[in-house]
Image (cartoon, rainbow, N blue to C red):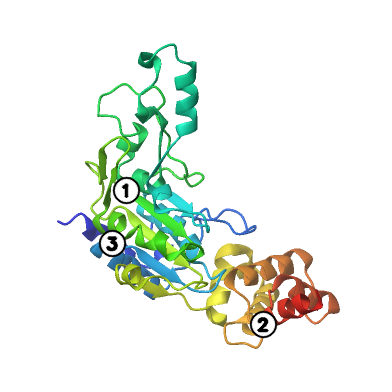
Amino acid sequence: MNEVSPMLAALLQDVTDMPNAPQHPQPRKGDGRDGLVYSPTPEIITAIKVALITGRPLLLSGPPGCGKSSLAGFVARVLGFDYLEFVVDDESSPQDLQWKVDVIARLRDAQLARDSSQVPPLNDYVDPGPLWWALDPASAARRGAPEGAAVARPSRMPVRLKDHAPGRQGAVLLIDEIDKAESSFCNGLLVPLGSRQFHVTDVDVLVENGPGRAAESPLVIITTNGERDLPDAFVRRCVVLAIEGPDAARLEEIAGLHFPGIAEDGDLRERVRVLAQRFETGAKEHASTAEFLDLVGVLITMDADMESDQWRLVESLVVEKPSVRRNLFASW
């Protein structure tokens, strides 16, 4: 049987009922990226399946706070894969995802050495990037040195989810906020992500899926807030899903996952229902999922009267309103 089939069959189930689905022991604090809680829609599950089958990156678009980035950690836990991430900024280059060379350290060691024989090999100064770790962690740990060669300074995987022990060979790689970079960043990833391999020119090593890696690995999840248009050639090579803002029913469901005590308190459950209707997508003043969860957390902790002036202040503090930001900029 194809190695992908059991995993795809599992994804067809309700993810919250899966035996591998993580359970969140504590209410949410801040923007947790631990992958412990997520409520994937049928559209998200289908998009993950398609990305796994095709080997294409999954490009998620949507407004900030809608849950794009947190999906990657959840999928890594459910699949039992390693988790890696790379947050893009305006100075990022494609090679940052692949490898870097610490030329300053090598120059320092060369100056301190009595002769050239004492200078460590170049591999010792190669720093594997998250894409290298996702494709072949064994080669990354050796910094590209030949298998069996002595490595003075083995490298370590840069990011792991807290309290997550991967159960199988594979990785989920999150490339977050790719729209922060220039189009050249996307264009530079066309070949590495498309072919799932790249050449480390500094040490003449070809990085590709190592022996024993899962057929569907790595699953690359890319997020964009839509602040900048992405090159058409890049988008065409991705499975693309727009994550829509949640309606009231989904906001209630998500709140229940993050704050399990809601189900046991009828009065609180009703107040969360009212809050969800007030801030669902399409409402006059709607909140992102993250902002809505912040409101629920404050509501639970403060036990506030939702018709009071204090609560209206809470809403104005927590929910980011573009009209308010524009007014503030004008006053400055």
Check disc 1 and report its element: helix, strand or loop. loop
Check disc 3 and report its element: helix, strand or loop. helix
Q: Mark 2 and 1 residues: CB-CB less than 8 Å, in contact?
A: no
Cα gap from disc 2 to disc 3, whole angstroms: 39 Å
Is label 2 or label 3 in front? 3
Task: Specify the amino acid type for callout 3.
Answer: Leu
Q: Which of marks 2 and 3 is nearer the N terminus?
A: 3
Could you tell me if residue 17 is visible in this image?
Answer: no
Q: Name the residue under label 2.
A: 274
Q: Which of marks 3 and 1 is nearer the N terminus?
A: 3
Crowd band around label 3 with a 10 angstrom C-alpha radius: few (<14), some (14–19), many (20+): many
Quick check: 37 above or below 288? above
- In the displayed structure image, the side of residue 22 where residue 168 appears, left or right: left
Rendering coords of residue 171 (x, y %) = 35, 50
Q: Earlier in the sequence, mark 2 or mark 1?
A: 1
Q: Name the residue under label 3.
A: 52
Residue drawn at x 45%, y 27% is 106
